[in-house]
């Protein structure tokens, strides 16, 4: 039998000399393994390394007689390579690269001694056997060796998690460079095939799904849902992202993607309703819903009505009257879009100027050189706007205004540049930009997913309405018309969504009822008392509902199969509320929990105020209001969380991966968010959400088919 040579590069046979005499009995290594040829840093089979021959035994076992000439071929040379250094024979260790004497007169004793103390050899051979091995550790600034364990299953699992979390292609396991890198790190690691890694990803998805399901089941509060549709540009398929929002037991705002599901066309209200309802029931949150935030389209409006027919209304807030939340970011988008239709001609020369100086690289360089000559900091590149994105128009104007002098200088030097805006046009652009800045700032504020936004909605949306009222009195007729168009669109949606957001404002100890009174006096004048009274009554009704729920137990405990007496009791639930209101009216001198809260002075406004922490520590004083705050403050005012998944989905489902099955896509998307959520425990859930601060401004980009795929399958209300 041939000898074998094993090293970090692989295991190779050692050819026997020609006319070799019969060799002595095989060594333990020969008895255990046959010679194997390994290609590309394989995962060698475990070898018996417990037996180390002594120098004397080595000579006895390896003396080969051949015509009276003795040749020594020690097995120690399996671990060394004979090289020439400055004309001298040297033995180089294959593991640590140390050079030792390699002449025949040096013998092999010193090689065996080095092999016994070589750290890299021990690490390699321990890993080969799949047992505990030595691994370098830094202790008090010094590198030492400690015990470690190689687990092939865990290594394969971590590889699958890396593919999920960082959006690596599944084909990475076939890449030559990756396989070499893996072999260098751990030669015994068997790089899995693409099918194997796909199975591992699905296994991780199922495990993380079970963990997330258990987490949602353990919540004692309600869950808010956001949902949106997206059409993949590579597959031309529609996907629905469904995201859950809640405040956890540590009073941190959390978000979890529940489904990223393929929805076959046509995307009718019935089909969307079935998909969303099935998801709610599969995740067992249909009885603990607070709101569902959707974009503004007729299909979504019809879908909500059908969802209410399938859910138990008694388990919802105010019997489902507060279920539908319209995405306020999309509303702002529609308001601004209507306004810009009037003024787009007023900024046409600026748009043409930007287009001219960004048309070629040479013109871009000339523009930058001119800015430097005028000592104007060139910190932002000119950007041409997209007609369907109002925020891109704002960005274009904001940047161009800063280079007004540059455009004027270039007019003197470039004869072909004929679209220089006039002084009046520059002033008009500044007026428009100043007004759009308010919308841009508030839209970015509503885009936050790290902090509650429900309590911030009311004061900011009121500021927008006050600003529009002021713009109507502008001496510029174009701005007047712009403001009128905005006001029409604003009034269309104002009454639909402001009630629950008014409650969120009352639950902010910095505002309470005082902020409502302050703004309503400006907005409604003589009718302000009625408007404030309506929000206050809704707060009292919610307190009554929550007190009844807290007395009965957890949400939805009385839902499902019920007896006849329970049906009567459920039918008389409104009667119970009537009795509570009547008692409060008769005993006006007995103040409720809400009354005590409202009578306390408002807190000073602070930028770093943490409203969730305030309610966490004041739950003993206001237990019912704390439960309401936990549910209301978790309601997102925009669908940015669901839309952010589409930003990642576009990367996962890139054109060269368009053959990815939708089940695999969903596993990658959902598992990614769940794994990042586990990594970021105690903060906002996952980085998928954080990367899309401005995505909601791009909702109506019909030309790219992104962000608002629903626009391609439904009729947006303009």
Image (tube, rainbow, N blue to C red):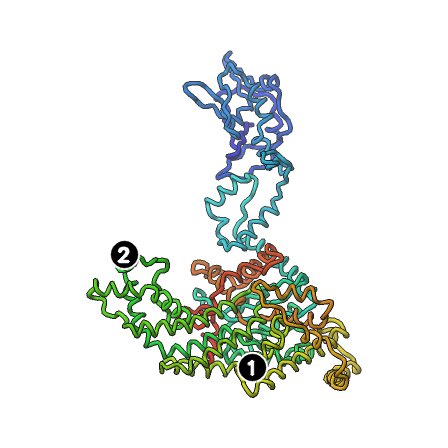
Query: Does residue 575 appear to the left or right of 650 in the view shown?
Result: right
Query: Does residue 615 appear to the left or right of 161 in the view shown?
Result: right
Q: Which mark is residue 520?
A: 1
Image location of residue 623, percent across then percent down? 72, 70
Q: Nearer the viewer, residue 266 or 334?
A: 334
What is the distance, in whole Å, between disc 2 and disc 1 at their CAs?
A: 52 Å
Look at the picture and state if 624 lies above or below 117.
below
Image location of residue 298, percent across then percent down? 51, 81
The C terminus, quarter of image: bottom left
Query: Does residue 501 appear to the left or right of 695 in the view shown?
Result: right
Look at the picture and state if 160 lies above or below 79.
below
Image location of residue 660, percent across then percent down? 49, 60
Image location of residue 540, percent across then percent down? 68, 80
Q: Nearer the viewer, residue 473 or 101?
A: 473
Quarter where residue 620 is shown: bottom right
Look at the picture and state if 474 lies above or below 701.
below
Q: Which residue is mark 2?
A: 373
Secondary structure of residue under mark 1: helix
Quarter where residue 151 is shown: top right
Q: Residue furthest bottom?
A: 526
């Amino acid at each position: 039998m041939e000898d074998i040579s094993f090293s970090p590069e692989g295991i190779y046979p050692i050819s026997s000399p020609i006319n070799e005499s019969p060799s002595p009995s095989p060594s333990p290594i020969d008895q255990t393994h046959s010679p194997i040829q390994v290609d590309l840093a394989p995962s060698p089979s475990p070898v018996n390394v417990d037996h180390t021959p002594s120098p004397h035994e080595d000579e006895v076992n390896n003396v080969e007689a051949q015509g009276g000439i003795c040749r020594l071929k020690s097995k120690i040379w399996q671990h060394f390579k004979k090289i020439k250094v400055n004309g001298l024979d040297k033995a180089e260790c294959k593991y640590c690269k140390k050079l030792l004497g390699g002449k025949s007169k040096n013998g092999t004793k010193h090689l065996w001694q080095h092999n016994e103390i070589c750290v890299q050899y021990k690490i390699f051979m321990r890993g080969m056997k799949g047992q505990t091995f030595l691994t370098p550790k830094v202790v008090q600034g010094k590198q030492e060796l400690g015990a470690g364990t190689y687990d092939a299953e865990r290594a394969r699992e971590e590889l699958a998690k890396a593919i999920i979390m960082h959006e690596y292609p599944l084909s990475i396991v076939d890449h030559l460079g990756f396989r070499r890198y893996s072999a260098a790190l751990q030669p015994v690691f068997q790089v899995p095939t693409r099918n194997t890694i796909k199975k591992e990803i699905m296994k991780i998805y199922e495990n993380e799904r079970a963990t997330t399901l258990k987490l949602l089941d353990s919540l004692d509060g309600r869950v808010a849902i956001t949902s949106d549709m997206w059409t993949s540009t590579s597959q031309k398929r529609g996907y629905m992202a469904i995201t859950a929002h809640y405040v956890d037991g540590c009073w941190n705002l959390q978000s979890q993607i529940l489904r990223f599901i393929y929805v076959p066309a046509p995307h009718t209200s019935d089909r969307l309703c079935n998909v969303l309802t099935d998801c709610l029931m599969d995740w067992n949150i249909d009885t603990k819903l607070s709101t569902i935030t959707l974009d503004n389209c007729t299909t979504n409006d019809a879908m909500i009505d059908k969802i209410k027919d399938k859910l138990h209304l008694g388990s919802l807030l105010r019997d489902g009257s507060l279920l539908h939340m319209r995405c306020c970011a999309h509303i702002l988008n529609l308001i601004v879009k209507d306004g810009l239709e009037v003024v787009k001609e007023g900024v046409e020369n600026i748009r043409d100027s930007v287009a001219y100086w960004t048309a070629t690289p040479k013109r871009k360089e000339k523009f930058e050189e001119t800015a430097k000559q005028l000592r104007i900091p060139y910190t932002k590149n000119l950007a041409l706007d997209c007609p369907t994105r109002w925020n891109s128009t704002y960005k274009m104007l904001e940047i161009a205004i800063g280079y007004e002098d540059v455009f004027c200088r270039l007019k003197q030097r470039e004869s072909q540049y004929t679209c220089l805006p006039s002084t009046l046009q520059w002033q008009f652009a500044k007026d428009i930009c100043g007004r759009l800045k308010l919308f841009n700032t508030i839209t970015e504020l509503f885009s936050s997913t790290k902090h509650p936004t429900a309590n911030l909605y009311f004061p900011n949306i009121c500021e927008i309405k006050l600003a529009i009222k002021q713009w109507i009195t502008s001496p510029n007729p174009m701005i007047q018309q712009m403001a009128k168009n905005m006001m029409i669109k604003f009034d269309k949606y104002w009454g639909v969504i402001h009630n629950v957001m008014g409650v969120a404002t009352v639950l902010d100890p910095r505002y309470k009822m005082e902020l409502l009174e302050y703004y309503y006096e400006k907005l409604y004048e003589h009718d302000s008392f009625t408007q404030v009274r309506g929000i206050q009554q809704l707060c009292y009704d919610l307190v009554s509902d929550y007190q009844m729920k807290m007395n009965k137990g957890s949400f939805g405990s009385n839902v499902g199969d019920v007896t006849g007496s329970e049906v009567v009791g459920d039918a008389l639930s409104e009667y119970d509320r009537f009795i509570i209101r009547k008692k409060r009216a008769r005993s006006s001198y007995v103040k409720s929990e809400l009354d005590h809260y409202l009578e306390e002075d408002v807190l000073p406004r602070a930028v770093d105020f943490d409203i969730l922490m305030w309610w966490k520590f004041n739950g003993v004083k206001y237990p019912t209001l704390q439960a309401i705050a936990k549910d209301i403050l978790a309601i997102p005012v925009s669908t940015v969380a669901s839309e952010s998944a589409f930003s990642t989905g576009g990367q996962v489902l890139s054109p060269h991966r368009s053959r990815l099955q939708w089940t695999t896509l969903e596993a990658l998307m959902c598992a990614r968010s769940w794994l990042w959520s586990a990594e970021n425990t105690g903060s906002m859930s996952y980085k998928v959400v954080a990367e899309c601060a401005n995505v909601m401004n791009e909702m109506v980009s019909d030309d790219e088919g992104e962000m608002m795929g629903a626009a391609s399958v439904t009729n947006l209300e303009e």
